[in-house]
Image (cartoon, grey):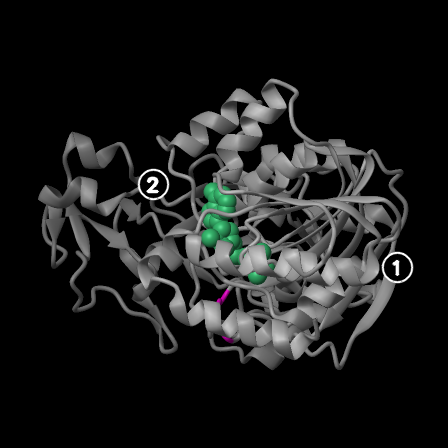
Amino acid sequence: MNSTVVDSLRHEANAKLDPQRKSALGQFMTPYKVAEFMASLFTRRDAAVLLDAGAGIGSLTLAASEVLNIHRAEAWELDPVMIAYLESNLDGLGVPYEIHEKDFVLDSVDRIQFMTGTRFTHAILNPPYKKIGAQSAHRFACRQVGLETVNLYTAFLALAILQMRQQGEIVIIIPRSFCNGPYYKPFRELMLVECAIDAIHIFASRNKAFKDDDVLQENVILKLTRGGTQGKVKLSTSRDASFADFQQRELEFDRVVNAGDREKFICIPLDDEPRDQDELFTHSLRELGVEVCTGPVVDFRLKQWWSQSPAAGTVPCIYPHHYTADGFQWPKEHKKPNALFRSPEVDKWLMREGIYVLVRRFSAKEERRRVVANLITPDDTRSEWVAFENHWNVLHVGKRGMQPEIARGLTCFLNSTPLDDYFRVFSGHTQVNATDLRNMKFPSIEKLTHMGRAWDRRLSQDAIDDLVRST
Ligand SMILES: C[S@@+](CC[C@H](N)C(=O)[O-])C[C@H]1O[C@@H](n2cnc3c(N)ncnc32)[C@H](O)[C@@H]1O
């Protein structure tokens, strides 16, 4: 079947899907060009026993059949609309196949636990993307095979890995968020213990690979080999699903997963960083004597203590919206409070006045930089105690502020383009967690002090970048 035919079937099936079910089942189908690229990553091509879980209309198996000699294919799918197409597409292949009209997660847990079912030589997957609730059947089922994970796509991949034969090859397209989120750490550990990473492809521009369905995540394609020997990793990029600007290079594995990294972040360096910039990334916050926590004040839990205006008996409550292009504006007209009344419930979350660096935890997708840092000093708030709201990461020293030059240097560095580029190597999403900051490297105290002395709140982006690069 050619790609135009498969894509028109995909559109036809897509139009029949129930929109509510579509979101519940994470039904975003792979364009055939992407499916073909995925299939091309298989290296062993003979006697394939193929797994396609969350198979949709079967585009991935069809693409795999172009390069593999398939002995048997098994597909899991829940949606009857998809299954009708899947059946007719697999029929056309003329190879033995089986469609399991079952929940892949629940069924796989049984098969792994009781050591039944097929063990596969190849898997090709575009699994559903959906959060797994803490109390859901999927979460409990996964725990039975020692798997702790928060999204269906990582559950699908982990369960596929556990049903592969040794040297079995997996190609999968998934969002990049598993690469660094703290909640995905157990999954990353499982994947890295069980598999070698042979290749990573990244769609370097948002919303291009799945433009039909308006999926916003940054997607990656991984090629893994269960029990494979870890060698260099092929890293390829393309702007979109046309692969017109396809580029590929090989990286030492240590550039992808740093040997000393306990979090097992998976880094995707898009450029060969010039050597001189390495000197900017030499010290962890810990080595600099700086700590980081999430802003301790969860405002809705303290609603009865909210105050619109600062008044006697209140403390300033600082939110990201207090920082604008024009600088720090507090107090400010807003639906959120500017201050909190002191009380034992409030006091336990306060921090003593001082010089802190506040890094926003969330940025908007369209913002140029992912990491945005602000400086706060006692002059800004004029209060013995301050409440930092939960949308911040707060950089502190022993729950107190820090030396002015270091705080200013950190603010300057965190707002620089070299830092933002560095951050994007291991993070695909717009969130910046305290764990991310703990795992990042910063310049030495001397360099930060130098930056801190020259930095000014009004510096332009270019001036900040020049200062950082020339330090
Ligand atoms: C992201 S779509 C991908 C479809 C197809 N693999 C492709 O690439 O076009 C995920 C598919 O998984 C199916 N699905 C969702 N949850 C499932 C589950 N628990 N078990 C089996 N299939 C599931 C959905 O109906 C949907 O067809």
In the rendered structure, the answer to whether residue 114 lies left or right of residue 167 reads: left
Residue 105 place in picture, x, y as percent: 52, 36
Which residue occupies 44% across, 64% down?
A: 363
In-front residue for pair 312/317: 317
Residue 372 lies in the magenta-colored region: no
Quadrant (top left, top right, bottom left, bottom right) of the N terminus: bottom right
Q: CA distance from mark 1 to mark 2?
A: 43 Å
In-front residue for pair 352/439: 439
- Tell me the number on the disc at residue 328: none
Which residue occupies 64% across, 56% down?
A: 90
Residue 382 place in picture, x, y as percent: 27, 55
Q: Which amino acid lies under the numbered mark 1 shown in the image of this protein?
A: Glu
Looking at the rendered image, the disc whose residue lies closer to the viewer, 1 or 2, is 1
Q: Is residue 51 above or below residue 451?
A: above
The residue indicated by pointer 1 is 250
The residue indicated by pointer 2 is 296
Residue 231 place in picture, x, y as percent: 90, 45
Which residue occupies 49% across, 61% down?
A: 430
Ligand 1 within 8 Å of the CB at mark 1: no
Which residues lie in the magenta part? Answer: 212-216
Q: Taking the image as drawn, is residue 128 in sight?
A: no
Q: Which amino acid lies under the numbered mark 2 shown in the image of this protein?
A: Pro
Dot 1 lies on which element?
strand
In the rendered structure, the answer to whether residue 219 lies left or right of residue 193 reads: left
